[in-house]
Image (cartoon, grey):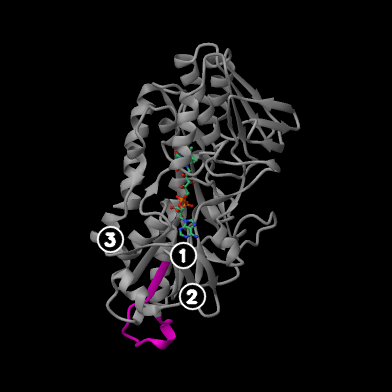
Amino acid sequence: MNTNRRDFLTLTGLTSLSLALPRSLRANTTPPHVLVIGGGFGGATVAKYLKLWGGNIDVTLIDRDASHYACILSNLVVTGAIPISRIQLGYGNLKTKRGVNIVQGEALSVDPASKEVTVKIGNDFFAYAFDKLVLSPGIDFINPAGNYNSDLTPHAWKAGPQTLLLKNQLAAMAKKQTFVMTIPKSPYRCPPGPYERACSVADYLKRKKSGAKIIVLDANASIQAEPINFGNAFTKTYKDVLTYIPNAAVSEVDSSTKTIVTSQGTFKGAVLNVIPNQRAGQIVANAGLVNDPTGKWALVNPLNYASTLYPDIHILGDSQGTGQPKSGHMANSQAKVCADAIIRGFSGEAPDPSPVTSSACFSPITSKTASWLTASFQYDPVTKAMKRVEPSFAEAPRPTSDGMEQMFHWADNIFADSFS
Ligand SMILES: Cc1cc2nc3c(=O)[nH]c(=O)nc-3n(C[C@H](O)[C@H](O)[C@H](O)COP(=O)(O)OP(=O)(O)OC[C@H]3O[C@@H](n4cnc5c(N)ncnc54)[C@H](O)[C@@H]3O)c2cc1C
């Protein structure tokens, strides 16, 4: 492995060796260095707010991609309602307006003892030292058994090329053909998201591919979010085109023949959209931080999102296992709690003892209407866990055209709050 600190400094545009050294080896006046892995909703927000609220803190944000494609609104890219450029979010504002060091590279491993992360940039490897590390890498997949290949049967559950692949496959469907999709076992990224996709695709098929059908194979026993609005959509609005099958656990996928075997039977489609079961991003597993009872997510202290294993490593967003929903809005909310706690910690202060987080998801139900879902959580000192605030847990009374308009305003706000 080529660990070259001088090259690392050149690449990040840093002017001194200080950030590459652990704090214990640096002068007391050197600002602390927070390294953030993953520039999605959790990572971009924590980087921004560390600079905005923290003053003299060096913040480096590392993402494998040059820009981030938001999953939010991505079902509308699949149906061709909006272009993919609408969900492409760059890091320029975080760099120029906020002073975050932006690095494009793949984080491979974390050494909690020496407080270093190994990052692959191009064909070279670099060691990045940190005082505090924040991991917000989103999800990775537990691939189904069989001959599964997401290049043939896309998940489109990480936005970007996969979104365009599914869009093209949908557009190429002939009339009277069948679109088959799966819904993973909970918990997964964006509880209403798969049902939203089913509605968006059903609406598209009704308008553009006469006689075509969609089969929705849900690994869960029932609809996992907005049961009234999605239930009405499935049984009324789309009753002629959509078949919903609960308790359909996937046992095998053959992507080459677009065939799927489930506990409810075998299905074949012109398009097969398999959204596999999910777990914390691979770097969290590589760091040895997956420690919840299911073996999929990272346990953290919800007062500061520090790992229960290493207090200087924080885990946010979809990868954490506090039981809060895995949404972009929630990742943004957790990132602010985390940034505030890290800043307080550098001054020797305790974190806010009663943090609140919140989330909203808007879901297109037809091409002209959308519904919404909201939830807030508050720290419960007795259980030391985040507890849902019941009055805040609600779904829209019905999908409306106003909801569709509000959805775009809400998305623009969360994009700006996280990336600008
Ligand atoms: C179809 C769909 C619709 C959705 N709609 C909504 C909605 O309406 N509202 C809502 O709030 N949420 C919505 N979500 C959920 C939301 O997109 C996720 O919950 C959110 O993106 C999670 O944020 P995160 O920071 O955990 O991960 P991400 O935002 O996915 O960011 C992870 C980043 O980490 C990078 N990365 C990962 N590993 C590494 C590594 N080893 N090295 C370098 N970089 C790495 C990735 O490139 C990525 O940029 C939706 C999701 C889907 C799929």
- Which is more N-terminal, label 2 or label 3? 3
Residue that numbered label 1 is attached to: 134
Nearest-to-viewer mark from 3 and 1 = 3
Q: Which residue is mark 3?
A: 95
Question: What label sits on residue 42 in the rendered view?
Answer: none
Name the mark on residue 116: 2
Residue drawn 27% across the image and 55% down it: 92
Tell which of 89 and 5 is nearer to you. Answer: 5
Magenta-tinted stretch: 21-35
| 379 with respect to 337 (left or right) | right
- Dot 2: element: strand
* Residue kind at label 3, given as amino acid type: Lys
Say which element carries label 1. Answer: strand
Q: Amino acid at mark 2?
A: Glu
Residue 310: in magenta span: no
Amino acid type assigned to the residue bearing label 1 in the image = Val
